[in-house]
Amino acid sequence: MKFTRLFRLTNIDKQIIVLMSLALLVVTNLLIGVVSLRLDFSKGSAYTLSPSTKKILHSLDDVVNIKFFVSSDLPTPLLPVKAEVEDLLNEYKKESRNKIIVKIIDPKKDPSSLTEIRELGIPELQYSQLEKNKYQLSNAYFALGIFFSDKKEILPQATDLGNLEYNTTSLIYKLTKKESTKIAVVGMEQATNPQQDPYAVFRNILSQQYDIVPLDLTPDSVKEIDSSYKTVILIDSNKKKYGEKEIEKIKKYVANKGKIVFLLDGVGINDNLTTEAATHDLFSLLEEWGITLNKDFVLSSSAEYVNFGNETYQFMTPYPFWIKTNNFNQKSGYFTNVAQLTFPWTSSVSMNKKSGLEMQTLISSPKNSWEQKDSYELLPQKIKQPELKDINEFSLVGQVQTREGGTAVLIPSSRFLNVQYLSKNSGNVDFIFNLINNLASGGALSGIRSRTITFYPLPELSDNTKDTVKYLDILLLPVLLALYGGVRLMRRK
């Protein structure tokens, strides 16, 4: 049945029908244009703003200006990245109810912006690309400037799409906070020479967003831990024992909704790779919160390479006591920017359920791990290989939250932030920074997801299987086409 007969339009001129159809399309398009509808079918809603970001945007009481400094002559691979950044910024603008103002600026077409860029310290980035069988270098700007009142922050290279939402939201949160946030540190001694400070990297990053206050818990220093400290970081030096009065201060702080991060050893280690009992004496305190710091070492074949040589020669070997892991609790928002963590000489943690406490394991060891307990052998050439029955996965980092709102996090490695034990791939500093961001903000930044689509790599295959798959790829389609052609030819005969 024809369309014209169905709607009894046979007596109407065809030109009128065409005009009516065009008019209907225009009206429909205008009506749809008014309605903002966006569906995100990606896994985990990767392209939808996280609830934490939306909450921060809804709470803005004044305008935040975001300037996207981007060159128009970008290398070809960066063009889709530019589109993604613009889409994200438009989402911020819509969700903020006009409290976010976005401006896109091409510094090469707007010379007046070059002065502003120099004042902000935004660098011109250099990119290389293969074009027409030749490597070509090009310079371009790709940065965000975020402005609120008389304060400003920059993201000098906004090409990391996976972490762009977290980075942008954290800068907005930092700029719009009513007052500066204090973070107290216990045991993070500062070297006389800044170049020899083992915590220099962490200290420099943390000080960009927080006021760092050294805290002495001895009875003669403070009566209690000030509740204005949004988070306390306690690092064990294996030289100090915490007495009853110091432990009571910690307990009272957490009971008053305080947040504390412990970096403690289950077993003490000396410079000559011998062991001794850990001296901090905080085991019983952790037990009260349902966390057991085990007096053992966790080892893994997923290990960092360590140089056990000297000035004369180098002896590089994977050292099972320096664990590499990416076995993270994916429900947590602490792992933005973090691909891998290193745990030098770490112990395991046991989480014991207790009434009124919410407990979770944040990080576990790789599945190819084992433990040493009771007797320890740390020298690489003397480490015994484990039996198959001893291979397991162990909890490494535990978190407990009290009914009142206090939080304690245990990282069972005092050297976790010490730069001399970290490789360039270790995300330890990023993890602690994310952790403190979330604790100090009362969870305002928690749960901000990566906006990248999850990549599913091919499983590990044997060489024979790889060859089979390769030849199937080469031969299967031609064989199928030949069979199909043969069948058609036989039917014709």
Image (cartoon, rainbow, N blue to C red):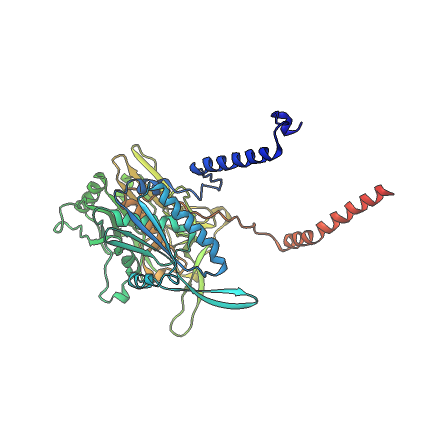
Q: Which residue is depicted at the point 37% across and 59% down?
A: 422
Q: Which residue is depicted at the point 29% across and 55% down?
A: 153
Q: Position of residue 216 (x, y in %)?
A: 18, 52
- How many discs appear? 0
Q: Is residue 252 left or right of residue 390?
A: left
Residue farthest along the left direction in this orientation: 220
Depth check: 153 or 33 in front? 33
Compared with 431, 420 (above or below) is below
Residue 412 is at least partly visible in this image = no
Q: Position of residue 394 (x, y in %)?
A: 41, 46
Q: Quadrant of residue 423?
A: bottom left
Residue farthest along the bottom direction in this orientation: 312
Q: Position of residue 20 (x, y in %)?
A: 55, 33
* Image quadrant containing the C terminus: top right
Q: Is residue 222 left or right of residue 83?
A: left
Residue 146 is at least partly visible in this image = yes
Q: Is residue 325 left or right of residue 263?
A: right
* Image quadrant containing the N terminus: top right
Q: Is residue 395 left or right of residue 236?
A: right
Q: Which residue is depicted at the point 21% across and 39% down?
A: 256
Q: Quadrant of residue 14?
A: top right
Residue farthest along the right direction in this orientation: 493
Q: Position of residue 178 (x, y in %)?
A: 21, 46
